[in-house]
Amino acid sequence: MSSFRARYITRPIHRWAKAALPALSDTESEALNAGEVWWDAELFSGNPDWSKLRSVAAPRLTKDEQAFLDGPCRELCDMLDDWTINQDTADLPPEVWKFLRENGFFGMIIPKSHGGLAFSAFAHSEVVRFISTRSVAAAVTVMVPNSLGPGELLHQFGTQEQQDYWLPRLADGRELPAFGLTSAEAGSDASAMVDDGVICKGQWDGKEVLGIRLNWAKRYITLSPVCTVLGLAFKLRDPDGLIGDTEEIGITCALVPTDLDGVETGRRHIPASTMFMNGPTTGKDVFIPLDNIIGGPDYAGRGWMMLMSALAAGRGISLPSMGCAAIALSAHTTGAYARIREQFRLPIGKFGGVQMRMGKLAADAYAMDAARHLTCAGLDEGRALSVISAIMKAHATFRMREALNDAMDVHSGKAVIDGPSNYLLPLYRAVPIGITVEGANIVTRSLIIFGQGSIRAHPHMLDNMMALQEPDPEKSLEMFDKSVWAHIGHTTRTLFRAWGRALTGGRFAPAPDAGKATHIYRRLGRWSAAYALTADVCFLTLGGALKRKEMLSSRMGDILSEMYIISAALKRWDDEGRQEADLPVLNYAAEAGFQRIQTALDDVIVNLPARWAAAILRGITWPGRREKGPDDVLVETCSDLIYAPSPTRERITGRIAGGCNHPSIMLLNDCYAKVNEMAPVMKRLRDARKTPQEGLEAGIVSDAEMRDIAEMSDLVARVIAVDDFTPDELSRYFRGYTPNAQNHYSQKNPSQEAAQ
């Protein structure tokens, strides 16, 4: 370290930075240290090393995992009737619960040594995606024990004794878990939690032991009404100093058997008319031994770190898989329906307005499933991808909402009328669930993606912050001198890189030889440099105030997310052998993504408080309006890819066609096949301006072809039909929606009662 530089240049910067950047709270520090960065760091660098992306092995299923999808998953879906579950019984059938237990659905993430299936992240994702196309209620029932909850926490942090006892019981379904985190007081802000536990002595198995007296009131807890063990997050206190000198120990996670005195479960919420098990739970003066803390007493007060670490994996799998299932199903069914349904003697898939929806559906299905594959590949490398998991959770569910809206627009009245034959409404109703749970999207988008990514994924920001947090002044200055000058060098290089690539449109940015996709790599490199420079300008001009500028943070998070999704689509195209026929959907995903990046970056500059910095940034990055988005020809081409049968259509929609089918989707598929089979015959009739009967009389069609036309017409009529009910049937279906509802939120939390 140069003493002159440190004394006269670095020291004033160090003093300013200490004042500008507030000290991190324990909660913020734990959130930042949870998980790790990966490809997101390359995108944040301003100069991505494409070889790192291309070297990631594409995820593959093992023989056992493929057999599970082809066997138990298909068998499960054949047992499900979503209409009956949601409108009549309000539960999965007993035989389905039994099947789930017997076939290990609740133990996909548990190691084989403890009786689980030990599936890869990709297999876990494929299972959830597969089931989601048939029943959201069943998919949620399967995903929750394999996501954030006792299983994941025990696997990561449990003591050997806890793992040996609980994991086999969770794997075979003897124990059904739930996890209690959310309460009326604490939603996205877990630090506001009032559910508490007090260190004290009590009776356990007939002996007096040191333990915890718990009081809680949780809500929105999936599987709570039927769980046998509750993973509970609460604030732990030790007022009598029984385990140390600290009274307020902090957020802690423990296992609470639900048959203990004082535990209440069983009541249910109705989450958007989707009847998976979800409800409140309360506990009053429930006593558990200290050994029930997940990880043992050493992990008392470390619950927030544990939750963030577990969420870094689970959030990247469960809801993104459901979101991708909904997008793929929307693309599959909309393409088929638009081919079958005619208006003005023309399939509606040939109307420009419909093609706008279908083109977007095709591209989003391709790109989001590519992002799902890439994320699973990273998770299967053993990485805890906190920022990427947040990107996937938010944007898979955002695009799920957009896809279902587009599908509903095209299906029109067919999708509006509820009934057993409606294959879109169950997923449509589930959209708010996906948007809200495992981190509400508003918070994820405005605080987490860029807020956490800006520190973890930036090449130097975390080093700067750690230097500023160092309590020893001289050591802090020494660390800061090293990190800040590395940061300044990085910013200087990025400035010239961003300017040069803006001037040339990225034409000379580094890129692999990717054939017709090479230009996309170059343009992505151009926006990566502009993004990195913009992030540094935000840090410089806003300092610690940046985390309170949530609108700016949201837009910066959107840019990082779009770059990740585009790079995933590039990776997919490469992994699948650069299929020429798939190039239009790759180009659409890139063009639409670049347009959104440009708009978001322009909005950041427009709203940057330091106007002098905004002017400089605009002159260097040129966000302008160069990116025009997909043109009409590309939109129509992509629309046709899900309108007409082809291998590309099958790649875009995945396993929907031959997999987990709703009976009405099976009918849709049969009709779609028949309509395409009969297309040449119908064209002959149109060219001759003849009805089928006139065509038969004129010898244009044969008797056999007339029978095929009749079969096709019958299938079309059945596909476009909608459900109707007698008054008695409606009364029977909706009788379950008039209980004596209890406003659970008006109840006092037992912790608050105890305090009073």
Image (spheres, rainbow, N blue to C red):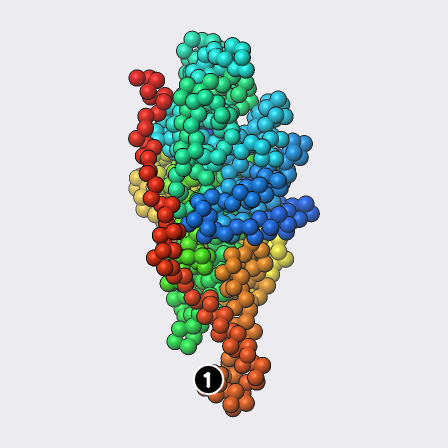
Q: Nearer the viewer, residue 460 or 314?
A: 314
Question: In the displayed structure, does residue 111 sit left or right of residue 734?
Answer: right
What residue would you read off at disc 1?
691
- Residue at point 54% right, 90% down? 699
Which residue sits at x=51%, y=77%? 710
Please state the horizontal and vertical placement of residue 108, each as a whole percent of the image.
Answer: 60, 39
Q: SS for tag 1?
A: loop
Amino acid carrying mark 1 in the image? Thr
Relative side of 440 to 38, left or right: left
For the point 56% across and 81% down, which residue is it?
705
Residue 10 in which image quadrant: top left
Quarter of the image with the C terminus is: top left
The residue that appears at 38% across and 45% down in the rendered structure is 736
Residue in front for this viewpoint, 214 or 50:
214
Front-most of residues 598 and 351: 351
Q: Is residue 450 visible?
A: no
Rendered location of residue 40, percent (x, y): 51, 41
Is residue 192 visible in the rendered image? The answer is yes
Estimate how packed mark 1 is, as few (under 14), some (14 to 19) or many (20 or more) residues with alpha carbons within 10 Å.
few
In the rendered image, the residue lying farthest to the right is: 63
What x and y, as percent, mark residue 120? 62, 41
Rendered view: 129 above or below 583? above
The answer to whether residue 465 is above or below residue 653 is above
Please say if 76 is above or below 302.
below
627 sits to left or right of 709? left
